[in-house]
Image (cartoon, helix red, strand yellow):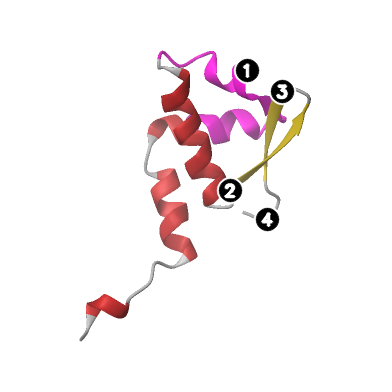
Amino acid sequence: MDTTAITPRPIDGIFRALADPTRRDVLARLSHSPASVSELARPFEMALPSFLEHLKILEGSGLVSSRKAGRVRTYQLVPGN
C-alpha cells in the first residue's frame, strides 16, 4: 500500500485537539458560555502565544469558532461537534 497518498481526515484533527488536557479544559469552559481569549487563558500558567496555539488547534479542528469585536476575540463551541 502506497502511504504517500494518504491525506489526514477531519476526524484526525478532532482527535489531535482532544488529546491535550488544556484543550479539553478550554472546551469544558466553553460549554458554559462563549469567552474571550483573556478569560480562557486566565486559569493557565503559560505564555499567551502558547495558549493561542491551543485555540488555533481547536478552531482548526472545527470544535470552536471565534469572532473579533474591536480588540477582543471571543471563542464559542461550534454546535453539532
Q: Cβ–Cβ below 8 Å for labels 1 and 2?
A: no
In the displayed structure, does residue 43 sit left or right of residue 72? left
Q: Is residue 42 located in the magenta-colored stretch of the structure?
A: yes
In the displayed structure, does residue 80 sit left or right of residue 3? right
- Numbered mark located on residue 68 in the image: none
The earlier-in-sequence mark between 3 and 1 is: 1
Q: Is residue 76 located in the magenta-colored stretch of the structure?
A: no
Quadrant housing the N terminus: bottom left
Could you tell me residue 13's position as x and y percent?
44, 55
Q: What's the CA distance linking mark 2 and mark 4?
A: 9 Å
Q: Under tag 3, what secondary structure?
A: strand
Which residue corresponds to the image point at 60% horizontal and 28% vertical from the top-left? 29
Q: Nearer the viewer, mark 3 or mark 1?
A: 3
Residue 32 lies in what quarter of the image?
top right
What span is colored magenta in the figure?
A: 24-45
Disc 4 residue type?
Answer: Gly
Q: Nearer the viewer, mark 2 or mark 4?
A: 2
Disc 3 residue type?
Answer: Val
Q: Nearer the viewer, mark 3 or mark 2?
A: 3
Which residue corresponds to the image point at 61% horizontal and 24% vertical from the top-left? 37
In the displayed structure, does residue 78 sit left or right of residue 40? right
Disc 1 residue type?
Answer: Glu
Q: Cβ–Cβ below 8 Å for labels 3 and 1?
A: no
Q: Under tag 1, what secondary structure?
A: helix
- Numbered mark located on residue 72 in the image: 3
Q: Which residue is mark 4?
A: 80
